[in-house]
Image (cartoon, grey):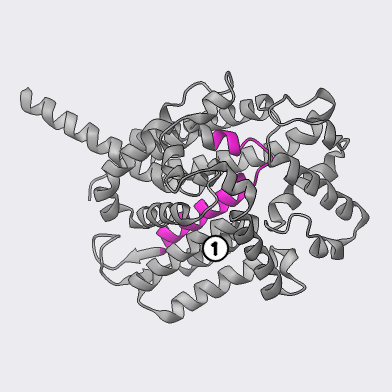
């Protein structure tokens, strides 16, 4: 066995630290500089209503609150907990305007919840750097990821839980043969598989669309473990944590979940969505341009990562299929979902950015290897 050199580990450790510090710096800068955005005027008022319930100890009202029923309350309860601790003045919502800077008097109300999103985004980068350093670097620099993980949106923490679920899942499957991702029989590390199921449930309890990761993991588990019992146990654990973390569902889980999902279907057919005129290929268009640099001049240093992640990911897919098939499956199924789902808002691409960066990081390695091989032949 080839001995790992100590300075190799040291170099990797330093790379992880530098990339995470960079991610934290860029997201904290965006927290302070980004103007008021559309969905912040939905989620932040909801967080203030939850904060009032928490302050009164009216826990039963949390389950009954349905002003924002299309999304589960977990992430908004995290925002509410921050508001409860700091107790900032609630903004005059009618006085706020999308695209304008946050008034000085309202910054305390916005910045705390924004930082919760930013911490979730930076921790996503940390995990992705452990998966593949170049993936972490690309995610750290992506302007969509910076933007939507630096505002009062529902992407930072649920996205973190989804990445953690896949991160743990990949390490929970151990091949009996020499190749960890071969088709050989698997041994399962339940000490990692159960936490993977738990974080998957929490991801869906933060924002329902992140539940699509569960479809990928269950399909992969069924194909590789070839055990229906294992699939049922994993599903049951994920469902349990999902229900425990989603108090909106407690009074009537099937009925309330159906109410939320049908709202999304109706919304996808609403005048607001239809009039936006976004074609089926909009997710790919978002992935091939750095639109946030044009929306918010002066906030982002570069949009280069946005432009190269998708093309490089296509280059890296063949090798990624052999070495990191779970991430490829997530990227592929996620892109299919975004293509078919009628609502095409740009923040939805955060569902697929982490796995795409894994493929893109491997794509960069492939280019580097090809260049190195060519240089050696010339020498």
Q: Residue at x 74, y 33 (%)?
A: 111
**Image coords of residue 292 (percent x, y):** 54, 29
Query: Residue beneath label 1, please?
Result: 195
* Left or right: where 281 falls relative to 267: left
In the depicted structure, whether residue 130 falls above or below residue 230: above
Given residues 342 and 151, the one toward you in this image is 342
Report x, y in % for residue 129: 44, 40
Which secondary structure dominates the residues rendered in magenta?
helix
- Tell me, yes or no, whether the highlighted magenta stretch contains residue 173: no
Task: Give the quarter of the image for residue 251.
Answer: bottom right
Residue 209 left/right relative to 77: left
Q: Give residue 114's quadrant in the image.
A: top right
The residue at the point 34 percent across, 35 percent down is 8
Callout 1: helix, strand or loop? helix
Q: Is residue 259 left or right of residue 328?
A: right
Is 81 in front, or is 300?
300
Query: Which residue is most to the left?
Result: 378
Find the residue positioned furthest to the right: 56
What is the span of residues highlighted in magenta in the rendered image? 145-172
Residue 74 placement (x, y as % from top left): 70, 56
Q: Is residue 158 magenta?
A: yes
Residue 374 in view of the camera:
yes
Q: Where is the C terminus found, in terms of image quarters?
A: top left
**Residue 146 image position (x, y, % from top left):** 56, 34
Residue farthest along the top direction in this orientation? 298
11 with respect to 65 (left or right): left
Instruction: Name the residue rendered at 25%, 60% in the picture.
Output: 179
């Amino acid at each position: 066995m080839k001995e790992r050199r100590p300075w190799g580990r040291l170099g990797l450790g330093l790379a992880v630290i530098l990339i995470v510090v960079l991610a934290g710096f860029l997201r904290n800068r965006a927290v302070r500089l980004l103007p008021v955005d559309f969905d912040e005027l939905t989620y932040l008022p909801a967080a203030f209503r939850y904060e009032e319930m928490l302050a009164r100890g009216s826990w039963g009202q949390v389950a009954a609150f349905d002003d924002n029923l299309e999304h589960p309350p977990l992430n908004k309860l995290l925002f509410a907990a921050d508001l409860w601790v700091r107790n900032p003045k609630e903004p005059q919502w009618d006085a706020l305007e999308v695209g304008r800077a946050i008034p000085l008097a309202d910054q305390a109300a916005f910045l705390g919840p924004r930082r919760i999103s930013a911490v979730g985004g930076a921790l996503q980068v940390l995990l992705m750097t452990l998966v593949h350093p170049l993936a972490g670097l690309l995610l750290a620099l992506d302007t969509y990821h910076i933007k939507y993980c630096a505002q009062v949106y529902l992407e930072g923490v649920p996205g973190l839980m989804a990445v953690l679920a896949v991160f743990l899942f990949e390490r929970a499957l151990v091949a009996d043969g020499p190749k960890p991702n071969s088709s050989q029989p698997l041994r399962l590390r339940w000490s990692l598989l159960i936490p993977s199921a738990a974080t998957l449930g929490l991801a869906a309890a933060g924002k329902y669309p992140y539940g699509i990761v569960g479809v990928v993991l269950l399909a992969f588990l069924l194909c590789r473990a070839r055990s229906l019992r294992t699939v049922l146990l994993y599903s049951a654990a994920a469902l349990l944590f999902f229900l425990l973390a989603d108090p909106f569902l407690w009074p009537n889980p099937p009925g309330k979940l159906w109410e939320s999902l049908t709202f999304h279907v109706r919304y996808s057919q609403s005048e607001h969505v239809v009039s936006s005129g976004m074609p089926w290929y909009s997710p790919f268009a978002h992935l091939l341009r750095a639109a946030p640099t044009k929306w918010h001049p002066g906030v982002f240093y570069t949009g280069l990562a946005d432009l190269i992640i998708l093309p490089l990911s296509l280059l890296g897919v063949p090798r990624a299929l052999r070495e990191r098939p779970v991430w490829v499956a997530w990227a592929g199924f996620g892109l299919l979902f975004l293509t078919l789902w009628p609502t095409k808002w740009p923040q939805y691409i955060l569902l697929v950015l982490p796995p795409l960066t894994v493929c893109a990081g491997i794509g960069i390695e492939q280019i580097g290897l090809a260049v190195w091989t060519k240089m050696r032949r010339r020498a």
